Structure formats: structure tokens, C-alpha cells
Amino acid sequence: MIYENLSVNLDGHLLFAGYDTLELAKEFGTALFVMDENRIRQRCREYQKAMAAYLPAGSHPLYASKAMSIKRIYQIMKEENMGVDVVSPGELYTAVKAGFPMENAYFHGSSKTDEDIRFAMEHKIGFFICDNADELDAIDAEAARQGICQKILLRLAPGIDPHTHEKINTGRVDSKFGVAIETGQATKLVGKTLAKKNIILWGYHCHVGSQLFDEALFCDTATNMLTFVADMQKQYGHTAKVVNLGGGMGVPYTEEQGKIDYAGTIQKIGAYITALCQQLQIAPPAILMEPGRSIVADSGITLYSVTGTKEIPGFKNFVGIDGGMTDNPRYTLYQSPYTVYNAGKMNECADFVCTVAGRCCESGDLIQENITLPRPVRGDILAVLTTGAYNYSMASNYNRVPRPPVVMIGQNGPYIAVRRETYEDLLLCDQ
Ligand code: LLP
């Protein structure tokens, strides 16, 4: 099967992390997110081990928590000694409430308000990823007000086009994120930063895109970033302590996309960076990476109950489910592929070609089109794989659909990490 934590029992039921998905659906209801805690921990360790082994001293991963941002995840990241990237005061607050050590947190975002900056500093965030010159002034002013020196990384646009989906492409010169190297604006911003009294320029950050499969992209990005480090050393005598290459390592959503060897990829990037630093005659800075998807995506599945089928002869067959774009908007937004199983009929012939449609009043509310399943009937359980990243975190209450719970499979079995939203929850802010 596509992942090692999936199997099928003698009754033809799909097991996830050793647990019968039909039993989980019965116990916790549907729609339901299920996450495999052990696999999340394994992924963290895989990154840590490979980065320590193959990248310059001090290199380590930060979990990009936008992929899945709930208290329990930050607790796991704390236990695993991961750093985290938070992109909003809301993510930051969740991390604080989870007891995450804020000195290991990095505050991202291209539109930070004064209030956001104050909030992050009051919570003693370790690092700001400063996006632009206006933000730099605001961080400096707030740091002066609080009487501190704030460590920052400058977000650069390294001019790399990863040719991934347009909506998750972030490293080009004309990106909304960061300051471009190519235009000379980044160099100027370094000069401005070094003149600030309440700011310490720790290093540079970039992120070129998400769902990337070619390690050459990371090497090209490293070339542009480290060349910039060398240039800044020459121009201003400034030595970057770290270079953050961002996240983006891809995840297979279907069997055809194959398996990805993260450690092997990091090894190749590491060898490239070592040679590059020699060539540029700079001491290799510590490298940070910010994986989000590749830490949590394949640790999650979503279980739905089938509400029925609709066969339109000569056209198509629909399978209705008790969820959809409100818990997983990724097909609607990006036409993202997913693997879908009829979880109780794993040993039956998959010959029913169908489109899985959600419950929203919206024709585009689809989870997947033209897939084959063992013919589902009302009450069957569908499992959608690889939903651990950018599903719960992108879920909404459109059509006032309550968000599903998140059940983690931990050492001692399943437990509720986030409870199901109630109708009363939906009214909490209504006056
Ligand atoms: N670092 C930065 C600065 C980022 O902007 C991102 C993702 C990451 C790290 C983590 O990237 P990852 O390792 O997860 O690829 N909603 C989209 C993904 C948006 C990603 C935004 N930034 C999706 O569902 O595919």
C-alpha cells in the first residue's frame, strides 16, 4: 500500500496505524480526521538526523505549523525538539498555549501589523522573519519601546521559479513575499538593517514553493542565497549565522507519485552546499529547513460516511459524503490528487467510476473526480489519504458546517486532540 502505516484486515477493512478505520468511524463519528502520532514523530526525527549528519553544524528543521496548527501538534514538536514557524498571531498563540518554548519559534508573514509585532515580542518570540523595509522599521521601533534587541532573518526572494502550482509558488522576483536579490533591493535592506540599533541580523530566509520534487531546486536556491551571503560579507562585513531554505519538499498523494527519500535528498543538498561554500570561500552557515507538508501530510486520513450515490447514465456517477470542501478545500482550490478507498470493501473489485462530492451548496465542492471504488452504498465509510497537512488548518465553516474532530493515534491508542465543533460553537461570536 502507499504508506507503511496502512494495512487491510481479514474482513477487508482498512487499518490505519493498526486501527480499524470502521471502528474509529463508529466510535468518533464522521467526518473525522485521524492522525498517526508515531509517524509525525518519525518524520521529525528523519529530518533532524539527516540535517545533523549532512548539513553544516547547527542545522536543524523547523516545523511549518501552517500545515496543521493545533495545540497537540505544538506539544509534539516541543517533545521532539523541533523549532516551529508561525505565520500569524493565532498560530503563535496556539503554540504559547501548548507550552512551546518561544525562543525556538520564528514569526513569518508578509503583512504584520504593529499589533502583531508587539504581541510576538511580548511573547518573546525567538526570531522574526522580516519581510520588507516597512516591517523592519516597525520591528525596530517596537524593540526599542520594549528595550530589547530583536533577532531577525530577512526574507529574500531568490528569483527561483519552481514551476509548482501557481498558488503555492513563492520564490520568484515578483513574489509578494520578501525582498528581491535580483533588483538590488535586498542588498539595500541589509545596509538598512545593519544600521538599526534594536535589531540583530541573524541571517536570511527564503521559501520558493510547496510540493517540490526536484532537489536541484533546493540547490539552485542555495546557490543564490549563499552567493548573497558571500556578497554581504564582502560589502558590509556581515556574517550570516543561518540561512533558512524554507519548506516545500513534496509528498506523494497517489501510488504513481512514488516514495520520497527525504534523508537522501538532504544528503545531496548537503554535499552541494559544502562544495558551494568552499567555492564562495565562506564559512558554511547553519541551514534551517521548514517542512510542513512532509512532516504531517501522510500522518493523516479523513473518514467520511457515504450519504448515497447518484448515477447519471451516459454522464457520471456521484458519491455523496458527510464532509467536503469545508474540511478539505484542496481539490476545489488546486485540483490536488488524493487516494480514496472504500474502507470496508478493501478486498472488493474497484469498478465503480465516480466523483466524490461534498455536502456544500457549491458545484465545485468535490474531493476527487473519476476515481474507481468498490461500489459504495449509503453508510459505507470512505477514507481519503494524506490529509494531515493543509486540511484541518484550511477547514472552514462554510454553510455553517461544523469542523470535524481530530483523533490522534498515540502510544496508548486513539485520543481526541480536537473535539468536534458543535452547533453552539458556530454561534460563539454571534451577538
Ligand atoms: N515556509 C514558508 C515560509 C512557507 O510559506 C511554507 C508554506 C512552508 C515553509 C511549508 O511548506 P511545505 O513544506 O508545507 O510545502 N495551502 C497549500 C500550501 C501552501 C503552502 C504555503 N507555504 C496547499 O494546500 O497545498
Image: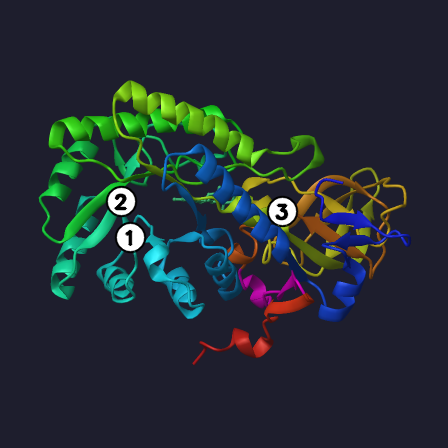
Q: Which quarter of the rendered picture does the C terminus lie within? A: bottom left
Which type of secondary structure does the marked residue at label 2 adopt?
strand
Badge 1 or badge 2: first in the primary sequence:
1
Q: State which region is magenta.
A: 396-411
User: Residue 359, how many percent across, how many down?
Assistant: 67, 59
Badge 3 or badge 2: first in the primary sequence:
2
| 3D distance between C-alphas at marks 3 and 1 | 29 Å
- Left or right relative to 239: residue 5: right
Within 10 Å of the Cα at label 2, are there few (<14), some (14-19), or many (20+) other Cα atoms?
many
Label 3 sits on residue: 298
The amino acid type, in three-letter code, at marker 2 is Leu
Q: Which mark is residue 127?
A: 1
Residue 220 can be seen in this image: no
The amino acid type, in three-letter code, at marker 1 is Phe
Q: Is mark 3 within 8 Å of ligand 1?
A: no
| 3D distance between C-alphas at marks 3 and 2 | 30 Å
User: Residue 104, how many percent across, how many down?
Assistant: 36, 55
User: Residue 211, how many percent across, how many down?
Assistant: 52, 37
Using the image as rendered, state which of residue 370 and residue 208 is in the foreground: 208
Label 2 sits on residue: 153
Q: Hey, which quadrant is residue 209 in on the image? A: top left
Using the image as rendered, state which of residue 334 and residue 287 is in the foreground: 287
Q: Residue at x 51, y 56 (%)?
A: 393
